[in-house]
Image: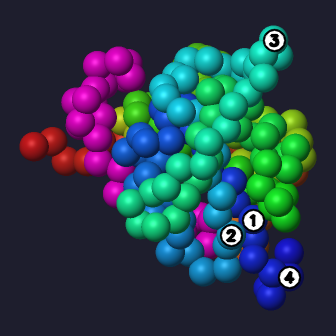
């Protein structure tokens, strides 16, 4: 990627377009110079859908406005459908060069990654030959089971991933690499 061209980044998740984790990461990525960010995410929670895709019905997509005046796209499909919609040209003139999926509400470690829609969306990027980052956040309860945590602080994880994206031209991911980032909970309160 030449330094004069904007890197095209697709942001998605499995918790839904209005999820706090995705919105915190979206705002952090918008501050990264030299990227064009497009958000395509499920219209609601699609956790633990793994690599499911929609094949038996049409998908609907709706442009949604965010509070900062920008917009994204919500679909009734799965996280993997979101990546495929981008690849199929949902947004004219946008062909993703990097997939960022998250920030997931809850960790994705061990066997959980096989069920995770967050990791699956990033994995779809790998299938399509694109570098990909999946990002997950442990809750303040420091649980390992995503169903138990309700309070999350996504700020530090969002800053970290934005920095990774900012540096990706200088330190690229090797072909076929999916970076699975899990952010531990901060200090106990």
In the structure shown, which secondary structural element does the residue marked by tag 1 occupy?
strand
First of labels 4, 1 by sequence position? 4
Q: Nearer the viewer, mark 4 or mark 3?
A: 3
Is there CB contact under 8 Å for labels 1 and 2?
A: yes
Is there CB contact under 8 Å for labels 4 and 3?
A: no
Q: Residue at x 81, y 81 (%)?
A: 5
Q: Residue at x 38, y 23 (%)?
A: 146
First of labels 3, 1 by sequence position? 1
Answer with the quarter of the image where residue 115 lies: top right
In the structure shown, which secondary structural element does the residue marked by tag 3 occupy?
loop
CA–CA distance in space, label 4 to label 1: 12 Å
In the structure shown, which secondary structural element does the residue marked by tag 2 occupy?
strand
Is 77 placed left or right of 154 in the picture?
right
Query: Residue 2, which numbered label?
Result: 4
First of labels 1, 2 by sequence position? 1
CA–CA distance in space, label 4 to label 3: 41 Å
Residue located beneath label 3 in the image: 56
**Would you say residue 81 sits in the magenta stretch?**
no
Residue located beneath label 1 in the image: 8
Label 1: few (<14), some or many (≥20) within 10 Å? Answer: some
Image position, residue 69 (x, y; %): 46, 67
Residue located beneath label 2 in the image: 36
**Range of magenta residues:** 139-166
Label 4: few (<14), some or many (≥20) within 10 Å? Answer: few
Q: Nearer the viewer, mark 4 or mark 1?
A: 1
**Would you say residue 158 sits in the magenta stretch?**
yes
CA–CA distance in space, label 2 to label 3: 32 Å
Q: Is residue 85 above or below residue 95?
A: above
Q: Nearer the viewer, residue 114 or 76?
A: 76
Q: Is residue 102 above or below residue 77?
A: below
């Amino acid at each position: 990627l030449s330094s004069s061209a904007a890197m095209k980044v697709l942001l998605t998740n499995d918790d839904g377009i209005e999820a706090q984790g995705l919105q915190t990461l979206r705002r952090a990525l918008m501050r990264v110079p030299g990227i064009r960010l497009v958000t395509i995410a499920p219209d609601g929670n699609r956790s633990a859908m793994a690599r499911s895709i929609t094949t038996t019905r049409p998908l609907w997509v709706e442009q949604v406005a965010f509070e900062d005046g920008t917009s994204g796209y919500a679909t009734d499909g799965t996280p993997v459908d979101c990546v495929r919609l981008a690849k199929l040209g949902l947004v004219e003139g946008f062909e993703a060069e990097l997939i960022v999926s998250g920030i997931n509400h809850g960790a994705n470690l061990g066997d959980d990654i096989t069920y995770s829609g967050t990791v699956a969306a990033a994995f779809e990027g790998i299938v399509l030959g694109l570098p990909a980052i999946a990002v997950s956040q442990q809750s303040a309860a420091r649980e390992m089971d995503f169903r138990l945590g309700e309070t999350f602080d996504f700020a530090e994880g969002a800053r970290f991933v934005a920095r990774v994206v900012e540096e990706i031209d200088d330190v690229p991911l090797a072909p076929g690499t999916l970076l699975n980032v899990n952010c531990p909970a901060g200090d106990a309160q």
